[in-house]
Image (spheres, rainbow, N blue to C red):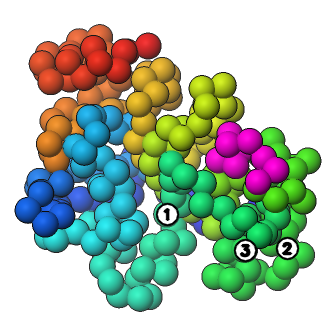
């Protein structure tokens, strides 16, 4: 499948400077400044409501930020229509809920965006979609509808659909939290394979095993701020931050 030119390792792909966001009187992001490098897997953790998902949604402009600056691969994140279209083609996102089109087959769900947005011819889009379904182990389910699949299978289809636009970065917003425990592994295995292939990933999750094994870097959010930015080894084994230690005690570090 044709992909966009891969960015160089360590090249800054996403840059946030002084980003703030409030919902009414509640400030969800407080002066968030950080950068994400190409081919890096960043795992983002923290208590519910600490700002993790809001930051992801701001990067993709699903949630406009109030102040500060977000730049993704040289594209300023704002409401400019042309910029937004380019941004969305470079950033894939996978949500807690699968958001698949129930009236379309799995194959059509995956091939729809390249056909609509990139005007890829239907045969080529479907061929590329089949290749992606093979990557996530679902080629035999291509002609089923989402309701015929398990939750884990639907989430793997959602990952394939996000990959269909050949994004430079993938955002995962708690992709396993809506799944039964026995289905979590099949989704995490697909994500591990993506990481092994060099995909730049930002992953909001409570799966600490994944954070330990796959993350290059862990960000801990606390009350809208990045309170901790460490390697997995330092985060889990040499933790001096009391808030992080309390969090790890609650979620379990295994």
Residue 225: in magenta span: no
**Crowd rating for badge 3 (residues with CA inside 10 Å; few <14, some 14–19, many 20+):** many
List x then y, in percent, for residue 194.
62, 42
Residue occupying image coordinates x 18% and y 54%: 28
Of residues 233 and 246, the one nearer the viewer is: 246
List x then y, in percent, for residue 190.
66, 38
Residues drawn in magenta = 147-156
Residue 151: in magenta span: yes
Of tags 3 and 2, the one toward the viewer is 3
Residue 91 numbered tag? 1
Q: Secondary structure at mark 2?
A: helix
Q: Quadrant of the C terminus?
A: top left
Q: CA distance from mark 2 to mark 1?
A: 22 Å
Q: Do tag 3 and tag 2 residues touch (Cβ < 8 Å)?
A: no
Name the residue at the left extreme. Answer: 25
Q: CA distance from mark 1 to mark 3?
A: 16 Å
Q: Does the image show residue 156?
A: no
State the residue position of label 2: 124
Is 101 on the left-hand or right-hand side of 66? right
- N-term-proximal mark, 2 vs 1: 1
- N-term-proximal mark, 1 vs 3: 1
State the residue position of label 3: 112
**Crowd rating for badge 1 (residues with CA inside 10 Å; few <14, some 14–19, many 20+):** many
Residue 223 numbered tag? none
Residue occupying image coordinates x 27% and y 14%: 249
List x then y, in percent, for residue 35.
28, 51
Q: Secondary structure at mark 3?
A: helix
């Amino acid at each position: 499948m044709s992909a966009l030119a891969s960015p160089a390792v360590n090249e800054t792909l996403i840059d946030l400077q002084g980003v703030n966001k409030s919902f009414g009187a509640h400030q969800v992001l407080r002066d968030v400044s950080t950068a994400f490098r190409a081919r890096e897997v960043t795992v983002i953790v923290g208590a519910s409501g600490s700002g993790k998902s809001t930051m992801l949604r701001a990067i993709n402009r699903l949630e406009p930020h109030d102040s500060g600056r977000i730049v993704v691969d040289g594209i300023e994140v704002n409401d400019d229509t042309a910029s937004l279209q380019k941004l969305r083609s470079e950033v894939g996102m996978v949500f807690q809920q699968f958001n698949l089109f129930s009236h379309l087959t799995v194959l059509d769900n995956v091939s729809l965006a390249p056909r609509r947005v990139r005007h890829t011819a239907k045969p080529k889009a479907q061929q590329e979609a089949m290749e992606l379904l093979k990557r996530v182990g679902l080629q035999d389910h291509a002609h089923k509808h989402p309701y015929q699949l398990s939750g884990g299978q639907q989430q793997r289809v959602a990952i394939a659909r996000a990959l269909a636009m050949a994004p430079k970065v993938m955002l995962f917003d708690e992709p396993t939290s809506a799944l039964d425990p026995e289905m979590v592994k099949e989704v995490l295995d697909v994500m591990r394979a993506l990481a092994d292939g060099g995909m730049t990933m930002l992953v909001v999750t409570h799966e600490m095993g994944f954070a330990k094994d796959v993350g290059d870097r862990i960000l801990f959010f606390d009350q809208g701020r990045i309170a901790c930015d460490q390697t997995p080894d330092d985060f889990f084994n040499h933790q001096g931050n009391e808030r992080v230690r309390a969090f790890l005690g609650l979620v379990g570090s295994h």
